[in-house]
Amino acid sequence: MEKLLNYINGKLVEPTSGDYFENMEPATGKAYSLIPDSDQRDVNAAVEAAKRAFKVWSKMSVEARSNILLRVAQLIGENLDELAAAESRDNGKPYKLAHTVDIPRAQANFHFYGTGILHFASESHAMGDVAINYTLREPIGVAGCISPWNLPLYLFSWKIAPALAAGNTVVAKPSEVTPYTAYLLSKICIEAGMPAGVLNIVHGLGPKAGAAIIEHDDVPMISFTGGTATGEWIARTAAPKFKKLSLELGGKNPNIIFANCDFEDMMKTTLRSSFANQGQICLCGSRILVERSLYEKFKTEFVARVKAMKVGNPKEDVNLGAVVSKPHMEKVLSYVELAKQEGGTVLCGGKKAEMTGEFAEGYYLEPTVIEGLSHTCRTNQEEIFGPVVTIQPFDTEEEALMMANSTKYGLASTVWTSDLKRAHRVARELHTGIVWINCWLLRDLRTPFGGVKSSGVGREGGFEALQFFTEPKNVCVKY
Ligand code: NDP
Protein backbone atom coordinates (compact mmCIF):
# COMPACT_ATOMS: atom_id res chain seq x y z
CA MET A 1 0.00 0.00 0.00
CA GLU A 2 1.21 3.51 -0.73
CA LYS A 3 2.93 5.23 2.20
CA LEU A 4 2.36 8.93 2.72
CA LEU A 5 5.38 10.88 3.99
CA ASN A 6 5.97 13.87 6.18
CA TYR A 7 7.32 17.04 4.56
CA ILE A 8 10.05 18.40 6.80
CA ASN A 9 12.85 20.79 5.88
CA GLY A 10 11.97 20.56 2.20
CA LYS A 11 12.14 16.77 2.05
CA LEU A 12 9.61 13.94 2.08
CA VAL A 13 10.56 11.78 5.06
CA GLU A 14 9.35 8.78 7.04
CA PRO A 15 8.12 9.29 10.61
CA THR A 16 10.84 8.83 13.25
CA SER A 17 8.92 5.94 14.82
CA GLY A 18 8.74 4.12 11.48
CA ASP A 19 5.09 3.43 12.30
CA TYR A 20 2.09 3.97 10.03
CA PHE A 21 -1.63 3.50 10.31
CA GLU A 22 -4.27 2.84 7.70
CA ASN A 23 -6.05 5.46 5.65
CA MET A 24 -9.60 4.40 4.80
CA GLU A 25 -11.58 5.09 1.66
CA PRO A 26 -15.10 6.10 2.82
CA ALA A 27 -16.73 5.01 -0.46
CA THR A 28 -15.65 1.37 0.01
CA GLY A 29 -14.77 1.13 3.72
CA LYS A 30 -11.36 -0.31 2.73
CA ALA A 31 -7.85 0.89 3.60
CA TYR A 32 -5.94 2.23 0.62
CA SER A 33 -2.85 4.02 1.93
CA LEU A 34 -0.73 4.38 5.04
CA ILE A 35 -0.34 7.49 7.17
CA PRO A 36 2.80 8.32 9.17
CA ASP A 37 2.18 7.96 12.90
CA SER A 38 4.29 11.00 13.77
CA ASP A 39 5.12 12.08 17.28
CA GLN A 40 6.88 14.83 19.19
CA ARG A 41 10.23 13.99 17.58
CA ASP A 42 8.88 14.70 14.09
CA VAL A 43 7.22 17.89 15.30
CA ASN A 44 10.49 18.98 16.96
CA ALA A 45 12.38 18.42 13.70
CA ALA A 46 9.72 20.37 11.78
CA VAL A 47 9.82 23.27 14.24
CA GLU A 48 13.63 23.40 14.11
CA ALA A 49 13.52 23.51 10.30
CA ALA A 50 10.81 26.20 10.40
CA LYS A 51 12.83 28.30 12.86
CA ARG A 52 15.89 28.17 10.60
CA ALA A 53 13.83 28.99 7.51
CA PHE A 54 12.12 31.90 9.27
CA LYS A 55 15.41 33.83 9.37
CA VAL A 56 15.47 33.89 5.57
CA TRP A 57 11.76 33.79 4.63
CA SER A 58 10.76 36.66 6.94
CA LYS A 59 13.44 38.89 5.39
CA MET A 60 12.60 38.09 1.78
CA SER A 61 10.81 40.80 -0.17
CA VAL A 62 7.03 40.44 -0.25
CA GLU A 63 7.27 40.18 -4.04
CA ALA A 64 9.57 37.15 -3.76
CA ARG A 65 7.26 35.45 -1.24
CA SER A 66 4.26 36.34 -3.35
CA ASN A 67 5.82 34.76 -6.45
CA ILE A 68 6.29 31.45 -4.67
CA LEU A 69 2.71 31.40 -3.37
CA LEU A 70 1.41 32.25 -6.84
CA ARG A 71 3.47 29.40 -8.27
CA VAL A 72 1.87 27.02 -5.74
CA ALA A 73 -1.56 28.33 -6.79
CA GLN A 74 -0.72 27.76 -10.43
CA LEU A 75 0.42 24.19 -9.79
CA ILE A 76 -2.73 23.42 -7.81
CA GLY A 77 -4.69 24.56 -10.88
CA GLU A 78 -2.57 22.46 -13.23
CA ASN A 79 -3.16 19.40 -11.04
CA LEU A 80 -6.87 20.03 -10.53
CA ASP A 81 -8.08 16.63 -11.79
CA GLU A 82 -5.61 14.61 -9.73
CA LEU A 83 -6.20 16.66 -6.58
CA ALA A 84 -9.98 16.49 -6.95
CA ALA A 85 -9.87 12.72 -7.43
CA ALA A 86 -7.62 12.36 -4.37
CA GLU A 87 -9.88 14.58 -2.24
CA SER A 88 -12.97 12.67 -3.28
CA ARG A 89 -11.34 9.32 -2.57
CA ASP A 90 -9.98 10.37 0.81
CA ASN A 91 -13.10 12.14 2.07
CA GLY A 92 -16.00 10.40 0.30
CA LYS A 93 -17.30 13.64 -1.19
CA PRO A 94 -18.57 13.71 -4.78
CA TYR A 95 -15.73 14.21 -7.26
CA LYS A 96 -17.77 16.94 -8.89
CA LEU A 97 -17.82 18.91 -5.63
CA ALA A 98 -14.08 18.51 -5.09
CA HIS A 99 -13.49 19.56 -8.70
CA THR A 100 -15.71 22.64 -8.61
CA VAL A 101 -15.35 23.77 -4.99
CA ASP A 102 -12.58 22.26 -2.84
CA ILE A 103 -9.59 22.37 -5.14
CA PRO A 104 -10.42 25.63 -6.96
CA ARG A 105 -10.84 27.22 -3.54
CA ALA A 106 -7.45 25.86 -2.37
CA GLN A 107 -5.94 27.40 -5.49
CA ALA A 108 -7.80 30.66 -4.81
CA ASN A 109 -6.51 30.74 -1.22
CA PHE A 110 -2.88 30.73 -2.38
CA HIS A 111 -3.66 33.18 -5.16
CA PHE A 112 -5.62 35.48 -2.87
CA TYR A 113 -2.90 35.74 -0.21
CA GLY A 114 -0.09 35.69 -2.78
CA THR A 115 -1.56 38.91 -4.17
CA GLY A 116 -3.16 40.17 -0.92
CA ILE A 117 0.20 40.55 0.80
CA LEU A 118 1.22 43.05 -1.89
CA HIS A 119 -1.64 45.29 -0.74
CA PHE A 120 -1.28 44.84 3.00
CA ALA A 121 -0.50 48.15 4.71
CA SER A 122 -0.36 49.53 8.22
CA GLU A 123 -1.45 52.76 9.88
CA SER A 124 0.31 55.93 10.96
CA HIS A 125 -0.85 58.36 13.63
CA ALA A 126 0.39 61.93 13.55
CA MET A 127 0.53 63.86 16.87
CA GLY A 128 0.15 67.40 15.53
CA ASP A 129 3.59 68.92 15.06
CA VAL A 130 5.12 66.86 17.88
CA ALA A 131 5.64 63.36 16.55
CA ILE A 132 4.58 60.69 14.12
CA ASN A 133 3.71 57.10 15.05
CA TYR A 134 3.77 54.34 12.55
CA THR A 135 2.84 50.70 12.97
CA LEU A 136 5.11 47.96 11.79
CA ARG A 137 3.37 44.64 11.15
CA GLU A 138 6.07 42.04 11.59
CA PRO A 139 5.98 38.31 10.99
CA ILE A 140 6.06 36.41 14.27
CA GLY A 141 7.84 33.10 13.76
CA VAL A 142 6.58 29.54 13.42
CA ALA A 143 2.82 29.21 12.98
CA GLY A 144 1.04 25.99 13.96
CA CYS A 145 -1.84 25.26 11.58
CA ILE A 146 -4.29 22.41 12.24
CA SER A 147 -7.29 21.68 10.06
CA PRO A 148 -10.22 19.22 9.95
CA TRP A 149 -11.38 16.57 7.49
CA ASN A 150 -14.52 18.07 5.96
CA LEU A 151 -12.89 20.46 3.47
CA PRO A 152 -9.34 19.13 3.65
CA LEU A 153 -7.14 21.09 1.23
CA TYR A 154 -9.57 24.02 1.19
CA LEU A 155 -9.22 24.69 4.94
CA PHE A 156 -5.57 23.60 5.19
CA SER A 157 -4.56 26.19 2.57
CA TRP A 158 -6.87 28.83 4.10
CA LYS A 159 -4.48 28.93 7.07
CA ILE A 160 -1.15 28.16 5.48
CA ALA A 161 -1.37 30.74 2.68
CA PRO A 162 -1.86 33.85 4.90
CA ALA A 163 0.66 32.58 7.47
CA LEU A 164 3.32 32.22 4.77
CA ALA A 165 2.35 35.40 2.93
CA ALA A 166 2.83 37.39 6.14
CA GLY A 167 6.41 36.07 6.40
CA ASN A 168 5.99 33.30 8.97
CA THR A 169 7.05 29.74 8.51
CA VAL A 170 4.61 26.93 9.23
CA VAL A 171 4.29 23.54 10.86
CA ALA A 172 0.94 22.12 9.80
CA LYS A 173 -1.06 18.99 10.41
CA PRO A 174 -4.05 17.93 8.33
CA SER A 175 -6.67 15.65 9.86
CA GLU A 176 -5.49 12.04 9.96
CA VAL A 177 -8.84 11.15 8.43
CA THR A 178 -8.05 13.04 5.20
CA PRO A 179 -4.29 13.57 4.81
CA TYR A 180 -3.86 12.79 1.12
CA THR A 181 -4.16 16.18 -0.57
CA ALA A 182 -1.89 17.74 2.08
CA TYR A 183 0.67 15.12 1.01
CA LEU A 184 0.18 16.11 -2.63
CA LEU A 185 0.57 19.76 -1.59
CA SER A 186 4.01 18.97 -0.17
CA LYS A 187 5.05 17.66 -3.58
CA ILE A 188 3.65 20.80 -5.20
CA CYS A 189 5.63 23.01 -2.82
CA ILE A 190 8.84 21.19 -3.75
CA GLU A 191 8.04 21.71 -7.44
CA ALA A 192 7.19 25.38 -6.80
CA GLY A 193 10.66 25.94 -5.33
CA MET A 194 9.49 26.77 -1.83
CA PRO A 195 12.65 27.10 0.28
CA ALA A 196 13.33 24.20 2.66
CA GLY A 197 11.62 24.50 6.05
CA VAL A 198 9.21 27.27 5.10
CA LEU A 199 6.27 24.87 5.12
CA ASN A 200 6.44 21.63 7.07
CA ILE A 201 3.61 19.08 7.07
CA VAL A 202 3.50 16.48 9.82
CA HIS A 203 0.94 13.67 9.52
CA GLY A 204 -0.48 11.75 12.43
CA LEU A 205 -3.02 11.65 15.19
CA GLY A 206 -4.51 14.80 16.71
CA PRO A 207 -3.81 14.00 20.36
CA LYS A 208 -0.21 12.98 19.51
CA ALA A 209 1.26 14.93 16.57
CA GLY A 210 -1.35 17.71 16.79
CA ALA A 211 -0.90 18.16 20.53
CA ALA A 212 2.90 18.31 20.10
CA ILE A 213 2.46 21.31 17.79
CA ILE A 214 0.10 23.06 20.21
CA GLU A 215 2.39 22.45 23.20
CA HIS A 216 5.67 23.38 21.50
CA ASP A 217 7.29 26.41 23.14
CA ASP A 218 8.63 27.69 19.82
CA VAL A 219 5.22 27.84 18.13
CA PRO A 220 3.84 31.20 19.32
CA MET A 221 0.65 31.24 17.23
CA ILE A 222 -1.94 28.59 16.50
CA SER A 223 -4.58 28.65 13.82
CA PHE A 224 -7.03 25.80 14.38
CA THR A 225 -10.24 24.71 12.69
CA GLY A 226 -12.09 21.77 14.17
CA GLY A 227 -14.47 20.70 16.88
CA THR A 228 -15.35 22.86 19.88
CA ALA A 229 -14.11 20.25 22.40
CA THR A 230 -10.66 20.18 20.76
CA GLY A 231 -10.70 23.98 20.57
CA GLU A 232 -11.35 24.17 24.32
CA TRP A 233 -8.38 21.93 25.03
CA ILE A 234 -6.18 23.99 22.72
CA ALA A 235 -7.26 27.23 24.40
CA ARG A 236 -6.50 25.79 27.86
CA THR A 237 -3.12 24.46 26.77
CA ALA A 238 -2.03 27.57 24.88
CA ALA A 239 -3.19 30.13 27.47
CA PRO A 240 -0.36 29.73 30.02
CA LYS A 241 2.14 30.12 27.18
CA PHE A 242 0.37 33.29 25.93
CA LYS A 243 0.12 32.00 22.37
CA LYS A 244 -1.89 33.87 19.79
CA LEU A 245 -4.97 31.83 18.94
CA SER A 246 -7.40 31.73 16.06
CA LEU A 247 -10.09 29.10 16.64
CA GLU A 248 -12.75 28.22 14.07
CA LEU A 249 -15.04 25.73 15.77
CA GLY A 250 -18.41 24.06 15.45
CA GLY A 251 -21.79 25.41 14.42
CA LYS A 252 -25.50 24.67 14.68
CA ASN A 253 -26.65 27.14 12.13
CA PRO A 254 -30.22 28.38 11.76
CA ASN A 255 -31.82 28.78 8.33
CA ILE A 256 -34.74 31.18 8.87
CA ILE A 257 -37.38 31.11 6.14
CA PHE A 258 -40.06 33.81 6.05
CA ALA A 259 -43.25 33.26 4.05
CA ASN A 260 -42.55 36.12 1.64
CA CYS A 261 -39.28 34.66 0.32
CA ASP A 262 -38.56 33.66 -3.27
CA PHE A 263 -39.75 30.08 -2.80
CA GLU A 264 -37.88 28.38 -5.64
CA ASP A 265 -34.58 30.12 -4.95
CA MET A 266 -34.92 29.32 -1.24
CA MET A 267 -35.81 25.69 -1.92
CA LYS A 268 -32.85 25.04 -4.24
CA THR A 269 -30.41 26.73 -1.89
CA THR A 270 -31.84 25.07 1.21
CA LEU A 271 -31.25 21.65 -0.34
CA ARG A 272 -27.62 22.67 -0.74
CA SER A 273 -27.22 24.36 2.64
CA SER A 274 -28.66 21.24 4.29
CA PHE A 275 -26.83 18.46 2.45
CA ALA A 276 -23.81 19.77 0.53
CA ASN A 277 -20.74 17.68 1.35
CA GLN A 278 -23.10 15.22 3.13
CA GLY A 279 -23.99 18.00 5.58
CA GLN A 280 -20.40 18.09 6.77
CA ILE A 281 -19.74 21.81 6.39
CA CYS A 282 -19.48 23.88 9.52
CA LEU A 283 -21.74 26.42 7.74
CA CYS A 284 -24.57 24.04 6.83
CA GLY A 285 -27.98 25.20 8.02
CA SER A 286 -29.03 22.26 10.14
CA ARG A 287 -31.96 23.95 11.93
CA ILE A 288 -34.55 25.06 9.41
CA LEU A 289 -37.03 27.52 10.93
CA VAL A 290 -40.07 28.16 8.74
CA GLU A 291 -42.83 30.76 9.19
CA ARG A 292 -45.99 28.84 10.06
CA SER A 293 -48.05 30.05 7.10
CA LEU A 294 -45.45 28.49 4.75
CA TYR A 295 -44.64 25.44 6.88
CA GLU A 296 -46.84 22.76 5.26
CA LYS A 297 -46.02 23.83 1.71
CA PHE A 298 -42.32 23.93 2.57
CA LYS A 299 -42.40 20.54 4.26
CA THR A 300 -44.18 18.77 1.39
CA GLU A 301 -41.94 20.19 -1.29
CA PHE A 302 -38.68 19.90 0.68
CA VAL A 303 -39.23 16.28 1.71
CA ALA A 304 -40.18 15.33 -1.87
CA ARG A 305 -36.98 16.86 -3.22
CA VAL A 306 -34.81 15.36 -0.47
CA LYS A 307 -36.22 11.91 -1.26
CA ALA A 308 -35.21 12.43 -4.88
CA MET A 309 -31.57 13.16 -3.98
CA LYS A 310 -29.11 10.54 -5.18
CA VAL A 311 -26.66 8.98 -2.74
CA GLY A 312 -23.86 6.81 -4.06
CA ASN A 313 -20.43 6.30 -5.60
CA PRO A 314 -18.70 9.71 -5.28
CA LYS A 315 -17.15 9.29 -8.71
CA GLU A 316 -20.59 9.41 -10.31
CA ASP A 317 -23.03 12.27 -10.69
CA VAL A 318 -24.56 12.02 -7.20
CA ASN A 319 -25.88 14.59 -4.74
CA LEU A 320 -24.32 12.89 -1.73
CA GLY A 321 -21.28 10.63 -1.51
CA ALA A 322 -20.11 8.83 1.63
CA VAL A 323 -19.63 10.44 5.03
CA VAL A 324 -16.04 10.61 6.15
CA SER A 325 -15.59 7.62 8.46
CA LYS A 326 -17.33 4.73 10.16
CA PRO A 327 -17.23 6.32 13.64
CA HIS A 328 -18.66 9.51 12.18
CA MET A 329 -21.44 7.60 10.40
CA GLU A 330 -22.30 5.89 13.69
CA LYS A 331 -22.29 9.21 15.53
CA VAL A 332 -24.73 10.72 13.00
CA LEU A 333 -27.02 7.66 13.23
CA SER A 334 -26.95 7.88 17.02
CA TYR A 335 -28.32 11.42 16.74
CA VAL A 336 -31.23 10.15 14.63
CA GLU A 337 -32.02 7.69 17.42
CA LEU A 338 -31.76 10.50 19.96
CA ALA A 339 -34.15 12.62 17.88
CA LYS A 340 -36.71 9.80 17.94
CA GLN A 341 -36.33 9.42 21.71
CA GLU A 342 -36.85 13.16 22.05
CA GLY A 343 -40.18 12.84 20.23
CA GLY A 344 -39.09 13.74 16.69
CA THR A 345 -40.66 12.29 13.55
CA VAL A 346 -38.32 11.22 10.78
CA LEU A 347 -39.95 12.48 7.57
CA CYS A 348 -37.38 10.88 5.29
CA GLY A 349 -34.01 9.15 5.52
CA GLY A 350 -32.75 8.31 8.99
CA LYS A 351 -30.72 5.27 8.09
CA LYS A 352 -27.76 3.90 6.14
CA ALA A 353 -28.15 4.07 2.39
CA GLU A 354 -27.64 0.47 1.29
CA MET A 355 -25.10 -0.07 -1.48
CA THR A 356 -23.95 -3.13 -3.35
CA GLY A 357 -20.71 -4.60 -4.68
CA GLU A 358 -17.50 -2.76 -3.82
CA PHE A 359 -19.51 0.00 -2.12
CA ALA A 360 -21.43 -2.29 0.26
CA GLU A 361 -19.08 -1.50 3.17
CA GLY A 362 -18.95 2.26 2.45
CA TYR A 363 -20.28 4.90 4.81
CA TYR A 364 -23.45 6.08 3.09
CA LEU A 365 -26.31 7.85 4.83
CA GLU A 366 -29.71 8.87 3.49
CA PRO A 367 -30.39 12.60 3.71
CA THR A 368 -32.64 13.00 6.72
CA VAL A 369 -35.38 15.46 7.68
CA ILE A 370 -36.87 15.46 11.18
CA GLU A 371 -39.80 17.45 12.60
CA GLY A 372 -41.68 17.73 15.84
CA LEU A 373 -38.80 18.67 18.15
CA SER A 374 -38.51 21.58 20.55
CA HIS A 375 -35.73 24.06 19.88
CA THR A 376 -34.21 23.26 23.29
CA CYS A 377 -33.75 19.49 22.84
CA ARG A 378 -30.27 18.03 22.33
CA THR A 379 -30.93 17.26 18.67
CA ASN A 380 -31.49 20.97 18.10
CA GLN A 381 -28.68 22.12 20.35
CA GLU A 382 -25.74 19.83 19.52
CA GLU A 383 -23.74 19.75 16.32
CA ILE A 384 -24.49 16.59 14.31
CA PHE A 385 -22.32 17.48 11.29
CA GLY A 386 -23.98 15.09 8.89
CA PRO A 387 -26.91 14.92 6.42
CA VAL A 388 -29.54 15.54 9.09
CA VAL A 389 -31.72 18.63 9.42
CA THR A 390 -34.69 19.49 11.59
CA ILE A 391 -37.62 21.66 10.55
CA GLN A 392 -39.50 23.80 13.05
CA PRO A 393 -42.37 26.29 12.55
CA PHE A 394 -42.39 29.79 14.08
CA ASP A 395 -45.08 32.48 14.34
CA THR A 396 -43.25 35.77 14.73
CA GLU A 397 -39.90 37.33 13.90
CA GLU A 398 -39.13 37.53 17.64
CA GLU A 399 -39.79 33.82 18.06
CA ALA A 400 -37.58 32.97 15.07
CA LEU A 401 -34.75 35.05 16.53
CA MET A 402 -35.18 33.52 19.95
CA MET A 403 -34.96 30.01 18.50
CA ALA A 404 -32.09 30.92 16.18
CA ASN A 405 -30.03 32.41 19.01
CA SER A 406 -30.79 29.65 21.52
CA THR A 407 -27.70 27.45 21.06
CA LYS A 408 -24.20 27.85 22.45
CA TYR A 409 -22.93 28.18 18.86
CA GLY A 410 -22.81 31.30 16.72
CA LEU A 411 -21.11 30.62 13.42
CA ALA A 412 -23.46 31.40 10.53
CA SER A 413 -27.11 31.98 9.79
CA THR A 414 -29.26 32.29 6.70
CA VAL A 415 -32.36 34.44 6.29
CA TRP A 416 -34.91 34.15 3.47
CA THR A 417 -37.21 37.13 2.97
CA SER A 418 -38.04 39.70 0.31
CA ASP A 419 -38.69 42.35 2.98
CA LEU A 420 -35.55 44.48 3.00
CA LYS A 421 -36.21 46.12 6.34
CA ARG A 422 -36.78 42.78 7.99
CA ALA A 423 -33.63 41.33 6.42
CA HIS A 424 -31.41 44.06 7.89
CA ARG A 425 -33.21 44.01 11.24
CA VAL A 426 -32.89 40.25 11.63
CA ALA A 427 -29.24 40.30 10.50
CA ARG A 428 -28.46 42.77 13.29
CA GLU A 429 -30.16 40.61 15.93
CA LEU A 430 -28.59 37.28 15.00
CA HIS A 431 -25.73 36.20 17.26
CA THR A 432 -23.54 34.74 14.54
CA GLY A 433 -20.30 35.79 12.84
CA ILE A 434 -21.81 35.47 9.38
CA VAL A 435 -25.35 36.18 8.09
CA TRP A 436 -26.40 35.23 4.57
CA ILE A 437 -29.51 36.98 3.25
CA ASN A 438 -31.26 35.14 0.40
CA CYS A 439 -28.14 33.07 -0.31
CA TRP A 440 -25.79 30.62 1.33
CA LEU A 441 -22.03 30.08 1.25
CA LEU A 442 -21.53 32.99 -1.08
CA ARG A 443 -17.96 33.82 -0.12
CA ASP A 444 -15.86 36.90 -0.77
CA LEU A 445 -12.40 36.06 0.55
CA ARG A 446 -11.87 39.64 1.71
CA THR A 447 -14.61 39.41 4.34
CA PRO A 448 -14.08 38.46 8.01
CA PHE A 449 -14.80 34.78 8.54
CA GLY A 450 -15.51 33.18 11.90
CA GLY A 451 -17.97 32.69 14.70
CA VAL A 452 -19.00 33.97 18.11
CA LYS A 453 -19.77 32.14 21.38
CA SER A 454 -18.62 28.49 21.23
CA SER A 455 -18.04 28.73 17.47
CA GLY A 456 -14.66 30.28 17.97
CA VAL A 457 -12.31 33.13 18.67
CA GLY A 458 -10.86 35.48 16.06
CA ARG A 459 -11.49 35.92 12.38
CA GLU A 460 -9.92 34.54 9.23
CA GLY A 461 -10.15 36.00 5.75
CA GLY A 462 -8.89 39.13 4.05
CA PHE A 463 -6.57 41.36 6.04
CA GLU A 464 -7.94 39.87 9.29
CA ALA A 465 -5.79 36.79 8.73
CA LEU A 466 -2.73 38.86 7.81
CA GLN A 467 -3.24 40.86 11.01
CA PHE A 468 -3.49 37.65 13.02
CA PHE A 469 -0.28 36.32 11.52
CA THR A 470 1.68 39.53 12.24
CA GLU A 471 2.55 41.39 15.42
CA PRO A 472 1.91 45.13 15.38
CA LYS A 473 4.72 47.32 16.71
CA ASN A 474 4.24 51.04 17.32
CA VAL A 475 7.23 53.24 16.47
CA CYS A 476 7.01 56.82 17.77
CA VAL A 477 9.35 59.41 16.21
CA LYS A 478 9.60 62.88 17.74
CA TYR A 479 9.99 65.61 15.17
P1 NDP B 1 -11.46 17.71 15.52
O1 NDP B 1 -11.49 18.80 16.51
O2 NDP B 1 -11.61 16.33 15.97
O3 NDP B 1 -10.11 17.76 14.69
C1 NDP B 1 -9.65 18.91 14.03
C2 NDP B 1 -8.17 18.81 13.86
O4 NDP B 1 -7.55 18.85 15.13
C3 NDP B 1 -7.71 17.51 13.22
O5 NDP B 1 -6.57 17.77 12.42
C4 NDP B 1 -7.35 16.69 14.42
O6 NDP B 1 -6.44 15.69 14.11
C5 NDP B 1 -6.73 17.72 15.31
N1 NDP B 1 -6.71 17.39 16.72
C6 NDP B 1 -7.51 16.56 17.42
N2 NDP B 1 -7.14 16.53 18.73
C7 NDP B 1 -6.10 17.39 18.85
C8 NDP B 1 -5.28 17.80 19.94
N3 NDP B 1 -5.46 17.37 21.17
N4 NDP B 1 -4.29 18.69 19.70
C9 NDP B 1 -4.11 19.17 18.47
N5 NDP B 1 -4.82 18.80 17.40
C10 NDP B 1 -5.82 17.93 17.58
O7 NDP B 1 -12.55 18.10 14.44
P2 NDP B 1 -12.94 17.27 13.16
O8 NDP B 1 -11.74 16.97 12.33
O9 NDP B 1 -13.84 16.17 13.60
O10 NDP B 1 -13.74 18.38 12.33
C11 NDP B 1 -15.08 18.61 12.48
C12 NDP B 1 -15.29 19.87 13.30
O11 NDP B 1 -14.68 20.97 12.68
C13 NDP B 1 -16.74 20.20 13.41
O12 NDP B 1 -17.05 20.56 14.74
C14 NDP B 1 -16.90 21.42 12.51
O13 NDP B 1 -17.93 22.26 12.85
C15 NDP B 1 -15.58 22.08 12.69
N6 NDP B 1 -15.31 22.97 11.59
C16 NDP B 1 -15.33 24.32 11.82
C17 NDP B 1 -15.17 25.22 10.79
C18 NDP B 1 -15.15 26.69 11.03
O14 NDP B 1 -14.66 27.41 10.17
N7 NDP B 1 -15.64 27.19 12.15
C19 NDP B 1 -14.97 24.74 9.40
C20 NDP B 1 -14.96 23.32 9.29
C21 NDP B 1 -15.12 22.48 10.35
P3 NDP B 1 -6.92 14.20 13.73
O15 NDP B 1 -8.13 14.31 12.88
O16 NDP B 1 -5.75 13.73 13.01
O17 NDP B 1 -7.19 13.53 15.03
Image (spheres, rainbow, N blue to C red):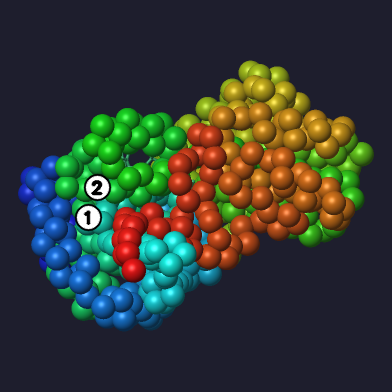
Specify the quadrant that holds the C terminus: bottom left
**Circle nearer the N terminus (1, 2):** 1
Looking at the image, which residue is at 45% across and 42% down? 457
Q: Secondary structure at mark 1?
A: strand
| Residue 69 vs residue 138, the one in the foreground | 138
Along the viewing direction, whichever of 318 and 399 lies nearer the viewer = 399
472 relative to 248, above or below: below
Residue bearing mark 2: 220
Q: Which amino acid type is shown beneath numbered disc 1?
A: Val
Q: Secondary structure at mark 2?
A: loop
* Residue beneath the point at 26% across and 78% down: 61
The picture quadrant for ligand 1 comes to: top left
Left or right: residue 137 versus residue 295 is left
Q: Is residue 254 above or below residue 403?
A: below
Query: Relative to 144, is 200 above or below?
Result: below
For disc 1, the neighbor class at 10 Å (few under 14, some 14 to 19, many from 20) is many
Q: Quadrant of the N terminus?
A: bottom left
Indicate the quadrant where residue 468 lies: bottom left
Q: Is residue 28 visible?
A: no
Q: Position of residue 270 (x, y in %)?
A: 71, 51
Task: Name the quadrant containing residue 110.
Answer: bottom left
Which one is in front, 457 or 190? Answer: 457
Whether label 1 touches label 2, CB < 8 Å: yes
Residue at numbered disc 1:
142
Quick check: 340 left or right of 185? Answer: right
- Determine if residue 291 is in view: yes
The percent coordinates of residue 221 (x first, y second) are 29, 48
Q: Nearer the viewer, residue 138 or 397?
A: 138
Task: Tell me which residue sits at (33%, 61%) in the image.
Answer: 476
